[in-house]
Amino acid sequence: MTHVKNLAILFAVVAGIAACASNPTPNASVAKAQLPGDPLPQPRWTGSIRAVVTDKLNEGDSTRERSYGTLVWTPGATPALSNAKIDFTYAGSARELTWGIFFGPCGNASLPVITLSDFPELEMSAGGRTQVTAALSIDLPTSGAFHVEIFKDRSGDRDFSVACGNLRFNRG
């Protein structure tokens, strides 16, 4: 009889442990609390930059350049400012490139959000890489369509475009 009683207790203990293991604790579904000093999530525009396919038959090179990068556009220190951080790797021979943020999607002939000359040059390292953070004189928009485009010269002429990326908005 003692043997049956011990088996019943053992069965109850195993069943209890199994029930606890399969049910999450009450705190498991609670979101992490915001701690003092933690940065608040910020709205942002982000995009992946990819090489533009170009026809370079006149230059004797018809291959696609292996260029890529990212852009993150966030609010600035004041409402009239925003910050854009661009990371870019360029496989071409140019060592200074121009870039800008434009209205609409890639392939759309449009104006930049601020004067193209207000975007700092991208100075490529010997390895073809650059990282620039720019303060822009524009409030971060919360709607619309935008893209980042990179050029071989300051004209912003689409014939000199080397890479482009559509931006996507995240409320933070």
Image (spheres, helix red, strand yellow):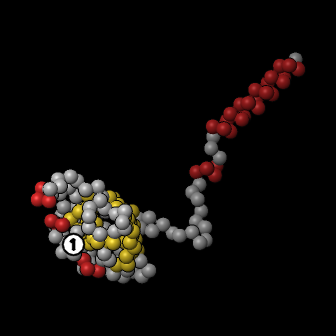
93 or 83, which lies in front? Answer: 93
The residue lying at 79 percent from left, 24 percent from top is 8
Residue that extends furthest to the right in the rendered view of this protein: 2
Identify residue type, mark 1: Asp
152 or 45, which lies in front? Answer: 152
The residue lying at 38 percent from left, 72 percent from top is 132
67 or 61, which lies in front? Answer: 61
Q: Can residue 34 be seen at all in this image of the molecule?
A: yes
Q: Secondary structure at mark 1?
A: loop
Relative side of 26 to 90, left or right: right
Residue that extends furthest to the left in the rendered view of this protein: 58
71 or 171, which lies in front? Answer: 71
The x and y percentages for residue 166 are 28, 61
Q: Is residue 12 above or below residue 78?
A: above
The x and y percentages for residue 142 are 34, 69
The x and y percentages for residue 116 are 24, 77
Mark 1, other Cα within 10 Å: few <14 / some 14–19 / many ≥20: some
The residue lying at 29 percent from left, 55 percent from top is 66
The residue lying at 67 percent from left, 35 percent from top is 19
The residue carrying mark 1 is: 153
Quadrant location of the N terminus in the rendered image: top right
Q: Is residue 5 above or below residue 122?
A: above
How many numbered badges does the structure rendering display? 1
Would you identify the image quadrant in which residue 123 lies? Answer: bottom left
Would you identify the image quadrant in which residue 24 lies? Answer: top right
Q: Can residue 103 be seen at all in this image of the molecule?
A: no
Quadrant location of the C terminus in the rendered image: bottom left
Residue that extends furthest to the top in the rendered view of this protein: 1
Relative side of 21 to 98, left or right: right
Would you identify the image quadrant in which residue 110 lies? Answer: bottom left
